[in-house]
Each structure stands twice: as structure tokens, then as C-alpha cells.
Image (spheres, rainbow, N blue to C red):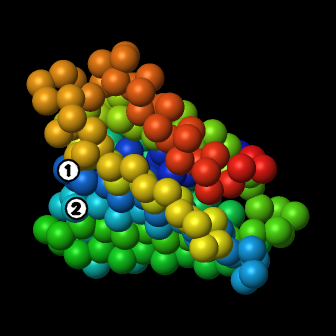
Amino acid sequence: MLELAEHILDIAENSVRAGARLIEINIAEDTANDSLSIEITDDGHGMKQEEINKVTDPFYTTKTVRRVGLGIPLLADAARITGGCFNLESQEGKGTTVKATFGLSHVDRQPMGNIISTLIVLIAGNSDVDFFYKYRHNDRQSEFDTRTIRKEIEDVPINHPEILKYIRGVLKEGFSEIKPEA
């Protein structure tokens, strides 16, 4: 994975496989402290302690389609090489929180990538899951919640092309208000 958005997609898809109905994605850039944090929280089935202990081992996976699980180990390594850290907390029956913190200006920090397209892919491919996204840049922030959109569109599927187009516009507008130089 070459971009942080790809890590976010991977972790969120893990959450979907874990039965999550709500996935929260929080990204915070703090230029004063030279840090970037990504936190993904879900209400899925959580993990047993033995799974938590193995999760950063690339040769451990709960997936049946392959015998290695590189997503979380690669994210943890990407954070650590920038002077950051990685943390995973999970409770069976309650959900999981994955948090990676990076040195914002570190030369080895992966670029964010296209987070808006990542969110659209997640929403389009998982129309029965709700997503809450918050992006903070220093003291400014923007939030997006599919639960709010669902109330507005009533019985129209959230992955309808026109709804996805609208969501993309909302996300772009929110992002440009927070970080106009991007």
C-alpha cells in the first residue's frame, strides 16, 4: 500500500467483514505538533485477546482466501518509520479501534491519497453500513455522516449514482473549506 487512503480502505473493509454497522473514520492533522493521526472505530464483533496479540504478525490472518494478512502490519510499520505509533484496541462483541499516528512532515510518510474516492468506494460497496468521517486540520474541521444523508433521501438507495455524486460534492466542499490550499 502506497497511500494512507489505501490503508483506510483496508481497515474499513476489515470492519465490514467483522459485521460493523457503523464505521467512524477520524483524520487529524496538527501542524504545530507535526502529527497526522488516523483513527478508525467500528461496532463490529471485535476480537479475542489471542487475535489482538497476533494482529501485527504478517503471517496471521482471519481471512480464508489467503494465508497472510499484511494490511495492519504495513500500517503499523508505516506509522513507526515516521516516528509515530500504532495502537489497536478491541473488545469482543463491542468493536475495534485502530489508531495510527505519523510524523506529518517526515520524509517517509506516505501521502494521504484520494480519501474522497476511498469514502465513495466504501459507501457504494457497503450500502447497508453507515460511515461517519471527520477531518480536522489544526483548529478547523469538517464532518460527514451517511446517517444524515439517509434521512434526507428516504427510500432512495445511498449507493444510487446521483446520491454518490451528491456525496462526492459534499465531501469535496467540506475538505476545501478546511484545507483550501490542497
Mark toward the start of the polypeptide (2 vs 1): 1
- The residue positioned 50% from the left and 31% from the top of the image is 169
- The residue positioned 22% from the left and 61% from the top of the image is 43
Q: Quadrant of residue 113?
A: top right
Q: Position of residue 55 (x, y in %)?
A: 43, 67
- For the residue carrying disc 2, how many other residues have a C-alpha within 10 Å: few (<14), some (14-19), or many (20+)? many
Q: What residue type is labelled 2?
A: Asp
Asked whether, in this view, residue 157 is left or right of residue 28, the answer is: left
Q: Using the image, tell me which numbered label, if any, was put on residue 9.
A: none
The answer, for residue 50, to whether it is visible in the render is no
Name, please, the residue furthest toward the front.
177
Between residues 132 and 141, which one lies in front from this camera angle? Answer: 141
Asked whether, in this view, residue 111 is left or right of residue 45, the answer is: right
Q: In this view, does 169 lie above or below 80?
A: above
Between residues 110 and 25, which one lies in front from this camera angle? Answer: 25
How much space separates mark 2 and mark 1, taking CA atoms?
Answer: 6 Å
Name, please, the residue furthest toward the top.
161
- For the residue carrying disc 1, how many other residues have a C-alpha within 10 Å: few (<14), some (14-19), or many (20+)? some
Label 2: state its secondary structure: loop
Name, please, the residue furthest toward the right.
107
Between residues 40 and 14, which one lies in front from this camera angle? Answer: 40
Q: Where is residue 4 in the image (x, y as percent from the top left)?
A: 63, 52
- The residue positioned 63% from the left and 65% from the top of the image is 137
Q: Position of residue 119 (x, y in %)?
A: 46, 40
State yes or no: discs 2 and 1 in contact (Cβ < 8 Å): yes
State the residue position of label 2: 43
Asked whether, in this view, residue 150 is left or right of residue 86, the answer is: left
Q: What residue type is labelled 1?
A: Arg
State the residue position of label 1: 21
Asked whether, in this view, residue 157 is left or right of residue 50, the answer is: left
- The residue positioned 18% from the left and 22% from the top of the image is 156
